[in-house]
Image: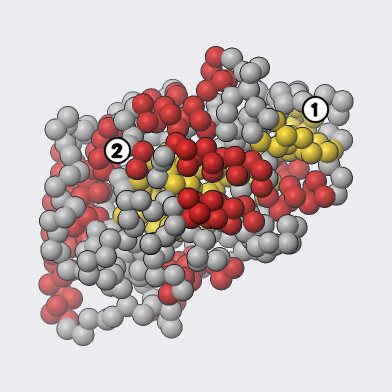
Amino acid sequence: MFIKQFVTKNAVLEGTDKSPIPKSNSKNEFVTLLIRLMWVLLIIAVCCCLYVPSSSTCNGMQDSSTFHRFFVPDAQEGILRNGSSTEKKIVCYYALPNKGSSEATMSAKDIDPTLCTHIIISKAKIENSTIVPLDEGDLKVYAEVVSLKKQNPDLHVLLSLGSGFPSLVQDLTHGFDGLDLDWEFPVWPSWKKNSKEKNRFAYFVLQLNNALKLASHPPLLLTAAVGVSKNIIDNSYEIGQLAKCVDFVSVMGYNYHQFKPYLPFTGHNAPLAKSSQEKGYFATLNIQWDTLYWMSKGMPKEKLVIGIPTFGRTWKLLNSKWHNVGAPAVAEGMHEGKITYLEACIFVKEGAVHYFDNESKVPYAVRDQDWVSYEDTVSIRDKVQWILAAGVAGVMTWNLNSDDWAGLCSGKKFELLNIVKDMLYHSFPKN
């Protein structure tokens, strides 16, 4: 099965795609033949290998490609799109609007393209081993986000993929700078997954990296969103191999606590540090511990981007008088357990009592039986300050949609993300 293009009808993106159109049919046929030959060889290699050989490497192919610049027609010769080694990355996920969600109202046109070094569109799906949009309307959104590069030529736009093993790389002819893998998670839960998936995932990343680096000059980017907690990290990733094959990983430093019937207690969504009351496994559920663990397992600092949320989590308390961290809860709280920064800001402005945990460095708010864990300007500053001190590659935010992107509560558009940008660029100015 060969590659399906993102856009099957030119009318969908008419007026938005400025890529040059080859005039020679024979040239098109020649390029297509080369691409198909490459994918046939790739499929054979994947089918023959179910694990990662210890000698496998992603090095050696990234700088040797002389392949025609077919995948990203607006790429400029000699310019590396992954930026300089000293510039800190600000990786921003943009969730495609879904009807009925709090993310439905933000369009691509609302994005400030100067806030991020990378925007990752979440997400496309995999059907019959082929990458396809979740909805036909997503094609228009893809084009709108890619067009933001006209306002910020240094911006990189990637497309995020969910779980699965697509056997072919999608034809990135509309200005995408690469692919992001967002599989949550290989071999997890461990009792539901095939243990071989860990090695298969590592080998797939190796093959995908080689294909992407051959597909364009400059090479297309390959990134991955990766999990937290020791069990997930150990069960899901061949970290040494992953470190060789991706441009960077984004550690998802959130969802540490949310309401579960088997764990009906409040907790911080994204604690920076452990609390003195947390012992054993629970003392590892924080951004600091997981960042250091990823480093100890072999992920280089220069490829480690730390994720922080713009969203929060909500609980319905068993009793409004018991409202400390770890208080018993009976259900998810408002907004089906998940809340944007705008909604949390309004919640506090309308009378909820605000608390700040000085050990975990995060706020929470309570009103009657509603308990909310969220981020505010103080917690974001604390996180970015620690990330800078750790010397990693930068910050990822999930997501643009959940910030106060219109400035309706705070009075400043993208208030949280602007703090991230100001702190990173103050410490590491752009060239």
Residue 28 on image: x %, y %? 18, 76
Front in this rendered view, residue 371 or 362: 362
Callout 2 crowding tier (Cα within 10 Å): few <14, some 14–19, many ≥20: many
Report the residue at 87% width, 45% height from top: 351
**Is the residue marked by circle 1 packed among few (<14), some (14-19), or many (20+) residues within 10 Å?**
many
- Most distant residue in the top direction: 280
Question: Residue at point 57% right, 28% down?
Answer: 273
Q: Compare residues 100 and 321 and report the one nearer the observer.
A: 321
Answer left or right for 162 relative to 371.
left
Query: What is the x, y in percent for residue 109?
Result: 56, 71
Residue 71 coordinates in the image, percent (x, y): 27, 66
| The N terminus lies in quadrant | bottom left
Q: Is residue 184 left or right of residue 208?
A: right
Q: Which residue is mark 1?
A: 323
In the displayed structure, would residue 276 be above or below residue 170?
A: above
The percent coordinates of residue 348 (x first, y second) are 80, 46
Disc 1 residue type? Answer: His
**Which residue shows up at 56% across the image and 20% down it?**
283
Tell me which corner region of the image, top left, top right, bottom left or bottom right, holds residue 219.
bottom left
Residue in view at x 13 percent, y 67 percent: 33
Coloring applied to the structure: secondary structure
- Work out how far the residue at label 1 is from the one at label 2, CA to CA, in angstroms: 42 Å
Label 1: state its secondary structure.
loop
- Say which label, 1 or 2, has the lower sequence index: 2
In the picture as drawn, the residue positioned furthest to the bottom comes out as 23
Q: Amino acid at mark 2?
A: Leu
Which sits in the foreground, 7 or 237? 237
Disc 2, SS:
helix
Asked if residue 183 shows in the view, the reply is no
Q: What label sits on residue 242 in the rendered view?
A: 2
